[in-house]
Amino acid sequence: MSRSAFAWGLALSTVVLVQAQADPDPDCPPQREETAALNALLKQSPEALALEAARAGRIEFMLVLGYTGTLPGLSPATLECLGPFPTRVVPGTSDVVCTEEMAELQQPARDFAKRYNHRLLALTAPACERYNSADR
């Protein structure tokens, strides 16, 4: 193989490699905004946010997305006691986790939502609190 053929092949393979790295995975959307939003949320106090929401009349329990949506900290009996209510999705939670950072943030997001939901429940529906099990 001549030097020019080798150089041409090397240049072509480099272009293909760079292009492959630049093309996003269609099953894995960019998550920079979601990661930033979740990091910003996790820097706050869930109890203080719940108090602020209750005072403002924004009674929305935090919903964590995954394969299905869950309401950490709220038992099925509590949900039944509450009846229909609005939810607020915790940003950055999903069953499509494309980065290691996002994967590491999923458990802290669930823990945050659990603390928020417990506090909001205590502030807005104390009668339903008795149905909540300590392990949820």
Image: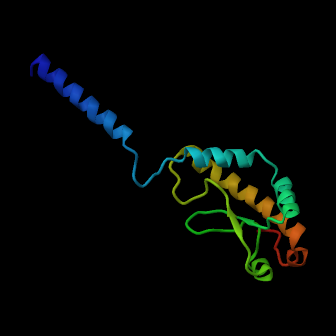
User: Picture coordinates of residue 87 (x, y %)?
Assistant: 70, 68
- Picture mark count: 0
> Dividing the picture into quarters, in which one does residue 68 lie?
bottom right
Going 85% across and 63% down the picture, which residue do you hit?
A: 54
Question: What residue appears at the point 71 percent right and 45 percent down from the top-left corner?
Answer: 40
- Classify the position of the C terminus by image quarter: bottom right
Q: Is residue 134 left or right of residue 3?
A: right
Q: Is 23 above or below relative to 78?
A: above
Q: Quadrant of residue 18?
A: top left
User: Going 54% across and 47% down the picture, which residue do you hit?
Assistant: 31
Residue 132, above or below 16: below
Report the residue that reaches farthest toward the top: 3
Residue 15: percent from left, percent from top: 27, 31
Give how far across and how far down residue 60 sits, in percent.
Answer: 75, 66
- Where does the N terminus fall, quadrant-wise? top left
Left or right: 69, with 15 as reference point = right
Q: Residue at x 53, y 53 (%)?
A: 97
